[in-house]
Image (cartoon, rainbow, N blue to C red):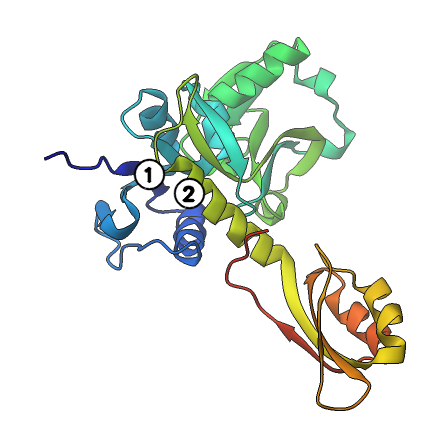
Amino acid sequence: MTTERLLRIAVPNKGSLAEAAAGMLRAAGYRQRTDSKDLTLIDADHGVEFYYLRPRDIAVYIGRGHLDVGITGRDMLLDSGAEATEMMPLGFGGSRFRFAAVDGASMSLADLEGKRIATSYPGLLNDYLVGQGIHAELVKLDGAVESAIRLGVADVVADVVDTGTTLRKAGLELFGDAICTSEAVLIKRKGSDLPDGVQGLQTRLQSVLVAQNYLMMDYNVAQEDLDATVALAPGVEGPTVSTLAKDGWCAVRVLVPRDGAHRLMDRLYDAGARGILLTELAACRL
């Protein structure tokens, strides 16, 4: 008797990606740990086993073939140098990797030549500088790089930026284009065939992404105004239209983009729609 092999998935165990990754997997129908100290969890109903690892280590485990797929940041994937590659973006954990310095607003990339640059992402930064033909000394720090200039360790810092508030509080200014625009991504080993179950995982994650970007809209409209409202909200594959008990009226259900949904409600009302409802989606397969 053979036992079906479980799909092994690496998930961030801490940091900014951990909660969002677990939330997305739950929305996709998978079990997730309830104790943050748990290192693994088996979801036998869906044929998967989750491993909770440091986000920076996930690409290494995937690249060496110890796990099948994983969720990590694009910046950490590129910095790792691991034999792993991005499969799909996951729509959370967005950030930019930027240069900053005292009076950085007056600096350009050319000013980096010969400078000491503090960073927690030496692999990613080195590849970028090589591509730009810039020679600089990299100072590897595990975190809090914004203090490196004040303490005399570096002339410039390169760090992950969300709002930039932390760097500004340290008296630093951003300059140059983004070295990398990052977000959470699903990754696999380079050159490997997709194990059984990965396609289903991707489909489920994609369904969550669709649900995050769309809402379900329901409204009633007189038959004579139906064409006008459908023109405003045609939906993805057309609306569902059914006849109401009220003579000459229809009930309409349609998928609409989340962005601008309330403005759309105003326009539909002006076109004759009534009883307009918006409903959140947990998941959606198109």
For the N terminus, the quadrant is top left
Task: Looking at this view, name the residue that lies furthest to the left.
Answer: 1
Percent x, y of residue 118? 51, 26
Q: Around disc 1, counting alpha carbons within 10 Å, would you say few (fewer than 14), some (14 to 19), or many (20 or more)? A: many
Percent x, y of residue 52? 29, 43
109 lies above or below 97 = above
Answer with mark 1 or mark 2, whichever residue precedes in sequence: 1
Depth order, front residue of 220/127: 220
Kindly identify the amino acid type of the residue bearing the numbered disc 2.
Leu
Q: Residue at x 75, y 23 (%)?
A: 108
- Count of numbered badges drawn on the protein: 2
Quadrant of res 192: top left
66 lies above or below 115 = below
Quadrant of res 29: bottom left
The residue wearing badge 2 is 201
- Residue at mark 1 to residue at mark 2: CA–CA distance: 10 Å
Q: Secondary structure at mark 2?
A: helix
Task: Looking at this view, name the residue that lies furthest to the bottom.
Answer: 246
Q: Secondary structure at mark 1?
A: strand
Q: Are marks 1 and 2 in contact (CB under 8 Å)?
A: yes
Percent x, y of residue 64? 31, 20
Mark 1 or mark 2, whichever is nearer to me:
2
Depth order, front residue of 115/83: 83
Q: Residue at x 66, y 18 (%)?
A: 112
Kindly identify the amino acid type of the residue bearing the numbered disc 1.
Ile
The residue wearing badge 1 is 9
Q: Residue at x 26, y 59 (%)?
A: 34
Q: Around disc 2, counting alpha carbons within 10 Å, would you say few (fewer than 14), some (14 to 19), or many (20 or more)? A: many
28 lies above or below 249 = above
Side of 239 where 172 appears, left or right = left
